Structures are given as C-alpha cells and as structure tokens.
Image (cartoon, rainbow, N blue to C red):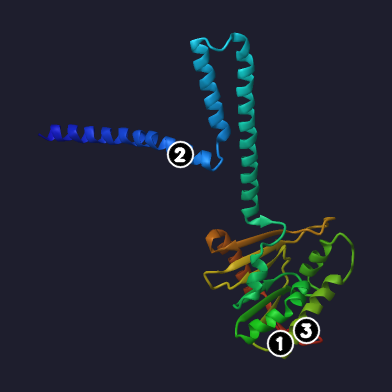
Amino acid sequence: MRMSRSVLGCNKATASDRGGPYRRSVNLPRRIVADVRHGENIDVYMTIVVALTIAVLNLVGVVPASSLTSLVLAVLGLLAIGGLTTRARLDQLRDAVALSGPMRIEFPASYLADLAKPGDLWVVGVARRGFINANFHQLADRLRAGHEVRVLLVRPGSAGAQLAEDRWPTKLPGVMDKSIGASLELLGGLQASVGGRLEVRLTDQELSFGAVYVNPSASSARLYLEYYAYKTRMDTQLRMMLSRRDGAWLDHFREQLEELWTDATAAILHPAAASETPR
C-alpha cells in the first residue's frame, strides 16, 4: 500500500511538471498578441513568418531556387535589424543603470528638496563657505525650529588645512585659512542672531570629502558626499548619495563622521572672529 501511494505521488508530480510547459504554450499566443499590440519584438515575429513561408514554399516547389537568395537576404536583413534594436535597448538599459547608481557628477534633485525640509543637519568639509553662504537662511530656519545643526570644519593653520590648500591647481598661500575663517564668522553671526542648537567643531585631520547629512536619525536620512579633487583642471567632483537602503555603506560613512566629530574640538564663535576652546 505504501508503495502504491509513493507511485501515485510520483505520477502527480509528473503531471504537475507537464502542466507547467503546457500552460506556458497556451499563453504563448496571448503573449504574441500583446507584443504586437505594444510594438515589441515585431522584427522577431516577422523573421519567423518569412522563414516559415520560405521553407513551406520551397518544400512544395513554388519558389524557384533563383529567388531563394533574395528571400534569404531579406531574412538576414530582418535579423540585422533585430540585432540593432537589441543593442540599442541594452545601451539604454546600461545608461539607466549608470544614472541610477550612487556615483554621479551632480547631486540628484532630492538634494535641494532635502535642504528645504525641516530636520537635523550635519555639515562636514574643509571650509564649506559656499554652502554656508548659499544656505544661510535655511540653516537659520532649522535652528529656529529647534533642530540640531552640526558643522565640522578643518582648523585654520593646521596641517589638514595646508594639505587641503595643496589640492588646488594654483598656489594661493593662506587662502584656505581665510576661507575657513570667513565660514566661522558667518556661523558666529548665525549663532548671535538666531541661537538654537548650533554646534561647530574643528578638526586637524585632512578631509578628502565633504558631507551633508540630512535627518541622520530618521528613516528618511540621506547622506550627500563629494570627494575633493587634486589639482585637476576641471572643476568637477565625484558625488554620491546614500540612504537607508544602502545599508552597510551608509553605516560605514556615518561611523567616520561620528569619529571625526568625537575627535574634533569645539569652537567659540563670534560674528567677526572665531577662536577655539580646549576640550
């Protein structure tokens, strides 16, 4: 009895296995109709029809041998068209994948949208003078709303500032210290006029990238990174955007930012001057 049940089980499995291809063959005409309606794979179906027509006519002797060459060339032409279409689609897919990846020349549109939204914000970089100038009022709005704004810059006069200055293609002694000093003055004015949870620290480390971390504790957190170039002629930087879905990579960079923040020293801000206090 047990053996007969196992045999029946095998027979059922076999029937089920056979049902899969059978159902697929039944759905094949529907798929062909759907492809034709959407204008997809037309070249493939035309090639199949022409090839089958030539084969049938050749078997019944309707088509003379002298005409077969032209018909074969026509089929090859259809195959070539199909190959070109496939290549174009693959190129489009490759470009789409490249544009949707994390690395890019410019930040995505979400960058400006995230900066306009409320929430905590971390800003990291050598001087970030341009960023602070461009987003001064948005930073003030965040502070008025009670959100935290962290700013980590390189200490003026440090080896890190000198190394950052050496990245420039043109030698401008002291320009980096002046840029950092200007950022500190802007932040001092921001603190004096708005107050709030603004905290600024200075690091001696050489920073190879700048970062803007939006809503770092929220599920919608996004980290925007830009790598500083070294003496390049073009004023371009490699940029990346990471979110929660990037998992370990977001955690990797967040850990670096937290360690840099921990090792940095706090800065006392004044609208016209900036000095630091020992930790």
Three-letter code for the amino acid on which mark 3 is drawn: Ala
Residue 260 at x, y percent in the picture = 65, 70
Residue assigned mark 3: 274
The first of marks 2 and 3 along the sequence is 2
Residue at 84% x, 62% y is 168
Residue 54 at x, y percent in the picture = 54, 18
Nearer the camera: disc 3 or disc 1: 1
Residue at 42% x, 35% y is 28
Three-letter code for the amino acid on which mark 1 is drawn: Gln
Residue assigned mark 1: 191
Quarter of the image with the N terminus in it = top left
Quarter of the image with the C terminus in it = bottom right
Outermost residue, front side = 62
The first of marks 2 and 1 along the sequence is 2
Res. 156 image quadrant: bottom right
Residue 31's tag is 2
The first of marks 3 and 1 along the sequence is 1
Q: Are marks 2 and 3 in contact (CB under 8 Å)?
A: no
